[in-house]
Amino acid sequence: MVTNNNYKEIKKILLIILALNWIVALSKIIYGIFTNCISMKSDGFHSLFDGVSNIIGLMGIAIASLPKDKNHPYGHKKYETLFSLGIATLIFITCFELVKEGIIRLYNKKIPYVNLGSFLIMIITMIINFFVMRYEYKKGKELNSDILISDSLHTKSDILTSISVIITLIFLKFRLFVFDPITTIIIALFIAYTGFEIVKESQGILCDKMVLDTKDVEKIVLSIEGVEACHKIRTRGRPDDIHIDLHVQVKKDMNIEKAHIISYKIEEIIKKKINGVSDVIIHMEPK
């Protein structure tokens, strides 16, 4: 389960990554403008949006960490997923702008200048991004954070685009200038795919997609003494905030007190055996 300490940890991670992303972004943008290399500059803006996504992530975490209240009895955790869609929106905007600039450059050629510094900037920033991506994804899994996981996917796309830019720089050294705008458009496609993956994951949570295999839940429930059958099993929520509701059948002559004890036992064992379950609603009925 995500605790307040986890949220503090997530905020700390996002602030560190924000600083690193902006260092990487400014390095690429400034050098890309200086050498008139559109693919390097575009990759820099991609990194810059990584930083913006970190700010959105911090906003999402601030709201998601709020406790349950009268108007939000299920808590605010889905706000983190909602803000993940904000990151996806930025990704699609970046994609559109890069495609537009790449097409313009195809028809209005400008000769870029490539030197040893161009390669050093790209290699160093790519190494930084690699370690950022590994660290952020690992922490996202440990802390059950949609924001960290989705942002690490964004950083992963930075690594892929950096590789394509390095290949482009090699072509530019041989005066094959057409590869500069073409690589920019390819970068945009990488970015678009990342955005699609984030939207795909987030919409499942926001639209209450089934998150557990009903057979696994049924197996646990049927193993409890006194349970005759169970059906109408439904699950929803985030991996760290799963809600389950189900119907459980017991013998028709069982008194209500014993049935109530069984329902508490079902809830206890489900929460113990399935990580992330925060709420279990059980409808007891006679068989």
Image (cartoon, rainbow, N blue to C red):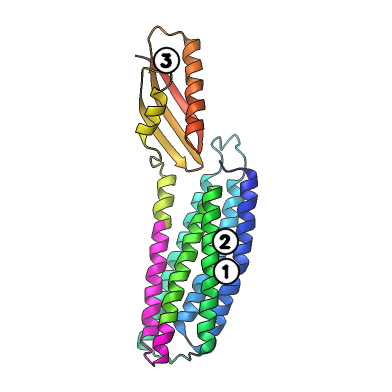
Q: Residues within 10 Å of mark 2 (few under 14, many from 20)?
A: many
Q: Are marks 2 and 1 in contact (CB under 8 Å)?
A: yes
- Rendered location of residue 278, percent (x, y): 52, 35
| Cα distance in 3D space between marks 2 and 1 | 9 Å
Question: Which numbered tag is attached to residue 226?
Answer: 3
Please name the amino acid that badge 3 sits on. Gly
- Rendered location of residue 42, percent (x, y): 47, 77
Q: Which residues are magenta?
A: 168-197
Judging by the rendered image, the residue that carries numbered circle 2 is: 54
- Rendered location of residue 204, percent (x, y): 40, 47
Please name the amino acid that badge 1 sits on. Asn
Choose the circle earlier in sequence order: 1 or 3: 1
Please name the amino acid that badge 2 sits on. Asn
Q: Is residue 222 above or below residue 7?
A: above
Name which residue lies at 41% across and 27% down: 220
| Cα distance in 3D space between marks 3 and 2 | 50 Å
Judging by the rendered image, the residue that carries numbered circle 1 is: 21
Chief secondary structure of the magenta span? helix
Q: Residues within 10 Å of mark 1 (few under 14, many from 20)?
A: many
Tell me, yes or no, if residue 90 can be seen here: no
